[in-house]
């Protein structure tokens, strides 16, 4: 590549790294920056300018841009970006309650407080205070889970996929697991039940068809190599029309008849009967335990509203076998998860308290009237910005449970829709998404929509401030 005379002059004008670091040392904005970080960022800035010059980007790079103060300002921005946390708080205005991409369930204040208390001090994580010797980390929550679910025994791992993997590897490695073809689900991130089963070393034995599976299909597939009957709750989709499936009670009866354990993967899992709140009924963990299922797995977050975890409940014999599996150590949860899970579970001792204090449950059961009040309050704040460019509307739109839960459920909700003169909805979405904190909504009919079901009470002012900044920046 031939370098022009002008490019040569610009390259010579680039300040040296040492000179830039010398100026940075005297800059109060950079005074607390670690030396290694500062050096790395300085090299990045100079290398970026060098590449721009060689690429012939002359309108963007001139001698004024290479002045030390201008380069120093570029260094300040680069350092600030390098030091900024990558994990940031977002405002979820999408209306999807358990939003997988936005962190799934919000923790209750009690769970956060316990995580801080345990995380900041030593604890009896694996120490039996009564006996004065090593204990089990599962003891912190096992009694609570059994109390709520009615199960004989319980344990917790890092997520539900891990729970399923661990159960299958313990009970059925090298042997067959019978499951309905219509229950071979795929969860987020392209993780599939057949893939998890393969990794566990178990052998998949499909029965029935996508839409219809009968008890005779399971019975006919039982052989001397069968280790387990598996039922998977289709929590993230539904098959409607000409369908048939075997009930949990029938599965348990067949298990007793054939001497085979029965396992159920509930996916999201819940301790609350949502039909009491006018929502679609979702199988509860308690119902599965009462039906006599030998092993039940479900998530600690999602509909349960706790931290990410996979919970296993069932017969003491099987759970004890699973605890002894060496794979358990690779899947165990840490003290922060354990602390927040314990506090979340404690709220379920009173279902009404759980619905009031666990954010996921509160949002799912939130009344349309309450959402409408919040939507009107936000609309009034935005209209008070008194911008002739801003158009604010209130719209009725459905919310979603999310997280692969309750796929057919539409939750009546209320949205605030924005239009800004000379700005497309896509531009509004991008600018609000790039703010601090980011406001995440959705686009519909060239309007930016914010669903108030998932917006917290203390976030209305933050949204208003974000829209105010957007209007000001786009005007200047």
Image (cartoon, helix red, strand yellow):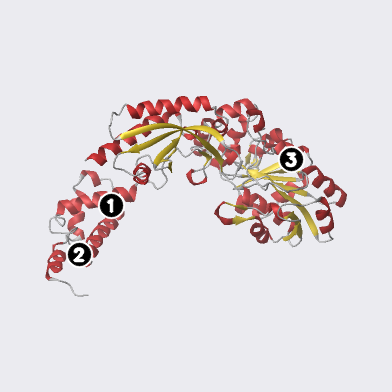
Q: Secondary structure at mark 1?
A: helix
Q: Which mark sits nearer the N-terminus, 3 or 1?
A: 1
Q: Nearer the viewer, mark 1 or mark 2?
A: 2
Location of mark 2 (residue): 53
Compare residues 315 and 325 and report the one nearer the observer.
Answer: 315
Compare residues 463 and 139 and report the one nearer the observer.
Answer: 463
Image position, residue 121 (x, y; %): 50, 37
Q: CA distance from mark 1 to mark 2?
A: 19 Å
Q: Secondary structure at mark 3?
A: helix
Image position, residue 407 (x, y; %): 60, 43
407 left or right of 43 in image = right
Tell me where residue 345 sits by quadrant: top right
The reply to whether the C-beta atoms of the residues labelled 1 and 2 are less than 8 Å apart is: no
Q: Residues within 10 Å of mark 1 (few under 14, many from 20)?
A: some
Residue 38 can be seen, yes or no = yes
Placement of 254 over or under 7, stated as above or below: above
Residue 124 can be seen, yes or no = no
60 left or right of 416 in image = left
Placement of 355 over or under 119, stated as above or below: above
Image position, residue 458 (x, y; %): 42, 29
Tell me where residue 71 sits by quadrant: bottom left
Locate the N terminus and report the quarter of the image it occupies. Answer: bottom left
Image position, residue 169 (x, y; %): 70, 56
Instruction: Residue at 19%, 55% (x, y): give it.
Output: 20
Q: CA distance from mark 3 to mark 1?
A: 54 Å
Q: Which mark sits nearer the N-terminus, 3 or 2?
A: 2
Locate the C terminus and report the quarter of the image it occupies. Answer: top left
Location of mark 1 (residue): 78
Q: Nearer the viewer, mark 3 or mark 1?
A: 3
Q: Residues within 10 Å of mark 2 (few under 14, many from 20)?
A: many
Q: CA distance from mark 3 to mark 2?
A: 67 Å
Location of mark 3 (residue): 288
């Amino acid at each position: 590549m031939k370098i022009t005379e002008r490019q040569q002059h610009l390259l010579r004008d680039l300040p040296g790294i040492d000179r830039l670091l010398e100026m940075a040392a005297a800059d109060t904005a950079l005074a607390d920056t670690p030396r290694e970080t500062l050096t790395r960022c300085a090299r990045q800035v100079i290398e970026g300018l060098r590449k721009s010059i060689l690429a012939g980007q002359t309108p963007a790079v001139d001698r004024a841009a290479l002045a030390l103060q201008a380069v120093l300002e570029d260094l300040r921005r680069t350092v600030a970006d390098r030091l900024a946390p990558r994990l940031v708080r977002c405002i979820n205005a999408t209306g999807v309650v358990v939003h997988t991409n936005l962190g799934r369930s919000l923790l209750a204040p009690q769970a956060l407080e316990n995580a801080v208390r345990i995380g900041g001090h030593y604890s009896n994580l694996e120490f039996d205070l009564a006996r004065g010797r090593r204990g089990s980390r599962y003891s912190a929550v096992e009694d609570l889970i059994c109390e709520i679910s009615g199960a004989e025994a319980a344990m917790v791992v890092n997520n539900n996929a891990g729970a399923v993997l661990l159960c299958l590897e313990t009970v059925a490695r090298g042997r067959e697991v019978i499951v309905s073809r219509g229950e071979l689900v795929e969860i987020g991130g392209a993780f599939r039940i057949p893939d998890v089963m393969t990794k566990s070393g178990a052998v998949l034995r499909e029965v029935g068809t996508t839409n219809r599976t009968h008890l005779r299909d399971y019975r006919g597939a039982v052989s001397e190599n069968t280790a387990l009957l598996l039922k998977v709750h289709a929590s993230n989709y539904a098959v409607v029309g000409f369908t048939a499936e075997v009930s949990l009670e029938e599965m348990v009866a067949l298990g007793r008849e054939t001497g085979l354990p029965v396992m159920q993967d509930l996916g999201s899992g819940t301790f609350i009967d949502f039909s009491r709140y006018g929502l679609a009924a979702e199988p509860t963990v308690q119902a599965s335990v009462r039906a006599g299922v030998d092993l039940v797995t479900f998530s600690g977050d999602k509909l349960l509203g706790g931290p990410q975890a996979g919970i296993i409940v069932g017969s003491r014999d099987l759970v004890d076998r699973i605890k002894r599996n060496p794979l358990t150590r690779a899947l165990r949860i840490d003290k922060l998860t354990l602390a927040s899970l314990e506090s979340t579970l404690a709220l379920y001792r009173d279902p009404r308290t759980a619905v009031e204090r666990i954010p996921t449950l509160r949002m799912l059961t939130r009344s349309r009237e309450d959402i409408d009040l919040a939507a009107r309050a936000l609309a009034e704040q935005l209209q008070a910005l008194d911008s002739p460019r801003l158009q604010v509307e209130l719209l009725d739109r459905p919310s979603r449970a999310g997280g692969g839960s309750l796929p057919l459920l539409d939750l009546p909700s209320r949205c605030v829709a924005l239009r800004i003169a000379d700005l497309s909805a896509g531009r509004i979405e991008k600018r609000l998404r790039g703010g601090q904190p980011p406001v995440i909504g959705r686009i519909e009919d060239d309007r930016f929509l914010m669903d108030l079901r998932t917006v917290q009470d203390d976030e209305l002012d933050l949204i208003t401030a974000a829209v105010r900044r957007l209007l000001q920046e786009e005007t200047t």
